[in-house]
Image (tube, grey):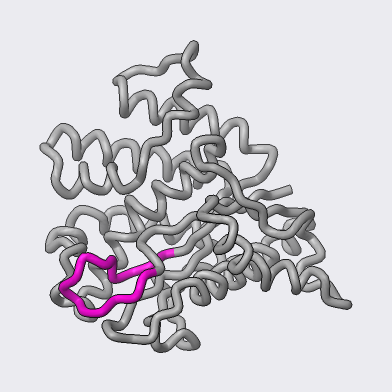
């Protein structure tokens, strides 16, 4: 069995112009982790987090430190704006985490959405479309591995949860079930209770977001959210992130006004 943890970075808000406070990109991505590896991945992640926060492992505080979420946006800020020591610690955490995920056969799926200013941006619909793309790619993994699966997405609110999960739920209730290997329709969890969601947040917010802003910077020339040195700081992760995308089309990018034209992101 595999479990796919889905999180997002950015916001589903409309972008009136490039130079506003609204984030110019929305990323929805999922990490599929083998169920038999969850315990090992979780314990290693807590150790990595403890090393970052305290400089040592804390076996007697494992449960407490599992609940204390380390946000990907804070790690991104440490790399972008922190002193050499703080940036180095954040880079070390990212490297160790990617090593752990690759060693345990994790797979990465997702969609990077670059907003077009003054476009009729429907963030909820694009979120639902991205969830469906992830579900289809993830189900291909389950077919390949002859495995069953479950989607656990970060809880965002009852109404929006229902809207983004409904297309997958309906597809499961069709006369010919589109997703026969899913145990349940997508379910939603609180990230401080799910190590998998915490890891997904770090991958998406710390690494994928700045790489997206660097790669598509020409489309958002005046954005306050991109940094000139993003490519310098984060390019080192592209190869190992690509290794997680074992299906070459599993992580794609689109522009919000060209949703049907997807290109490989990495």
| Residue 153 vs residue 228, the one in the foreground | 153
Left or right: residue 34 compared with residue 88: right
| Residue 53 vs residue 191, the one in the foreground | 191
| Image spot of residue 25 (x, y percent) | 33, 69
| Residue 172 vs residue 47, the one in the foreground | 172
Residue depicted at x 34% and y 86%: 119
Residue depicted at x 75% and y 72%: 170
The quarter of the picture where residue 96 lies is: top left
Total numbered labels placed on residues in the image: 0
The answer to whether residue 54 is visible is yes
Left or right: residue 175 compared with residue 134: right
* Majority secondary structure in the magenta region: loop
Residue situated furthest right in the rendering? 175
| Image spot of residue 232 (x, y percent) | 17, 57
Residue stretch rendered in magenta on the structure? 13-27
| Residue 114 vs residue 44, the one in the foreground | 114
The quarter of the picture where residue 218 lies is: bottom left
Residue depicted at x 73% and y 57%: 145
Left or right: residue 133 compared with residue 233: right
Compared to residue 88, the image places residue 9 above or below, namely below
| Image spot of residue 77 (x, y percent) | 22, 46
> Residue 17 colored magenta?
yes
> Residue 120 colored magenta?
no
Residue depicted at x 30% and y 37%: 92
- Quarter placement of the C terminus: bottom left
């Amino acid at each position: 069995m595999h479990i796919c943890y889905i999180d997002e970075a950015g916001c589903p808000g409309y972008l009136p112009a490039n130079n506003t406070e609204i984030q110019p990109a929305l990323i929805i991505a999922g990490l599929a982790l083998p169920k038999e590896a969850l315990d090992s991945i979780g314990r290693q992640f807590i150790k990595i987090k403890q090393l970052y926060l305290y400089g040592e492992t804390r076996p007697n505080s494992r449960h407490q430190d599992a609940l204390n979420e380390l946000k990907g946006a804070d790690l991104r800020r440490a790399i972008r704006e922190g002193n050499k020591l703080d940036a180095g610690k954040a880079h070390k955490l990212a490297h160790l985490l990617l090593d752990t995920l690759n060693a345990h056969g994790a797979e990465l799926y997702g969609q990077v959405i670059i907003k077009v200013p003054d476009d009729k941006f429907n963030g909820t619909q694009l979120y639902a479309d991205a969830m469906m793309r992830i579900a289809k790619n993830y189900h291909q993994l389950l077919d390949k591995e002859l495995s069953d699966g479950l989607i656990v997405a970060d809880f965002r609110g009852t109404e929006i949860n229902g809207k983004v999960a409904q297309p997958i739920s309906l597809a499961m209730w069709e006369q010919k079930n589109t997703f026969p290997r899913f145990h349940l329709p997508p379910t939603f969890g609180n990230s401080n209770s799910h190590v998998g969601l915490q890891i997904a947040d770090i991958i998406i917010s710390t690494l994928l977001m700045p790489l997206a802003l660097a790669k598509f910077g020409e489309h958002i020339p005046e954005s306050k959210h991109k940094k000139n040195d993003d490519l310098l700081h984060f390019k080192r992760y592209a190869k190992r992130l690509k290794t997680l995308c074992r299906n070459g089309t599993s992580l794609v990018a689109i522009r919000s006004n060209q949703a049907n034209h997807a290109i490989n992101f990495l």
